[in-house]
Image (cartoon, coloured by chain):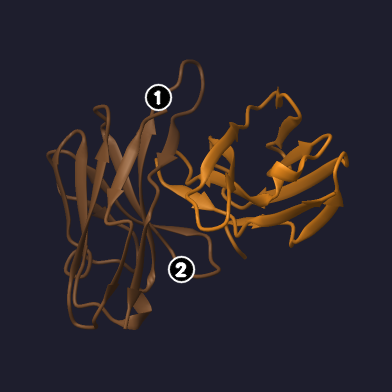
Amino acid sequence: SAVISQKPSRDICQRGTSLTIQCQVDSQVTMMFWYRQQPGQSLTLIATANQGSEATYESGFVIDKFPISRPNLTFSTLTVSNMSPEDSSIYLCSVEMRTAGGPDEQFFGPGTRLTVL
Amino acid sequence: RKEVEQDPGPFNVPEGATVAFNCTYSNSASQSFFWYRQDCRKEPKLLMSVYSSGNEDGRFTAQLNRASQYISLLIRDSKLSDSATYLCVVNAGGYNKLIFGAGTRLAVHP
């Protein structure tokens, strides 16, 4: 597995503002992902962030709302733009690691708990 | 129909009990299958990948039935520390995208 950290761990923000969440991993990885977990719900993939190319967004998520950077193989950021209370959620990054003889596995960062007032 | 469906919870069991969780998935092209556990207010942690032949890791046994598109997780000799939400996860048919089930909550009591 990998050691993954996220900053900030939590934040309370005013509507209309933006927040950038950082994800740092202790080894070089090709595939990084950003997920959202709304209260009482399971995880939903926002986008896949590959180094050297634009992020690939899932249906219902757009770059203007959730811009992503992936400047190198150990770091990524997700920005939640022009926030509204509906954006209150936990945002998690994950990385994909290859396993010997098995499927690629994903490991998650500790998450960023966002509350929008 | 949801892409990944799990048993509704919660499951309340005494210590030492055996408990089984079931999961079905809709995408027949899915190739990778996993069970994650998620503790309250924590991130999901990979419990085990699920292999076609079935696999065991200590008290945990995972089974896959591709024909029925069905995955199971068996926990033997439940411990208090097994209390968590168990997430059934499959990949989206050849892509890296993971689809998460809604989760099944397990509460093990003394």
Q: Colour of chain B?
A: orange
Q: Quadrant of residue A50?
A: top left
Q: Earlier in the sequence, mark 1 or mark 2?
A: 2
Q: Quadrant of the N terminus of chain A?
A: top left
Task: For label 1, count other residues whose C-alpha is less than 10 Å away and answer few (under 14), some (14-19) or many (20+).
Answer: few
Q: Quadrant of the C terminus of chain A?
A: bottom left
Q: Name above or below for residue A20 compared with residue A48.
A: below
Distance from disc 1 to disc 2, alpha carbons, whole Å, reads: 28 Å
Q: Residue at image x 53%, y 35%?
A: B31
Q: Are marks 1 and 2 on the same chain?
A: yes
Residue A98 marker:
1
Q: Residue at image x 74%, y 62%?
A: B8
Q: Quadrant of residue B58?
A: top right
Q: Nearer the viewer, residue B22 or B109?
A: B109
Residue A20 seen anywhere in this rendered image of the structure: yes
Q: Name above or below for residue A84 compared with residue B82.
A: below
Q: Is residue B105 left or right of residue B102?
A: right
Q: Name above or below for residue B81 compared with residue A37.
A: above
Q: Position of residue B7 (x, y in %)?
A: 74, 57
Residue A71 marker:
none
Q: Nearer the viewer, residue A23 or B3?
A: A23
Q: Are marks 1 and 2 in contact (CB under 8 Å)?
A: no
Q: Is residue A8 left or right of residue A37?
A: left
Q: Position of residue A86 (x, y in %)?
A: 37, 79
Per the image, label 1 sits on a secondary structure element best described as: loop
Mark 2 is on which residue type?
A: Gln
Q: Which chain is brown?
A: A
Q: Nearest to the eye among marks 1 and 2: give it.
A: 2
In the picture of the structure, the residue carrying the numbered disc 2 is: A38
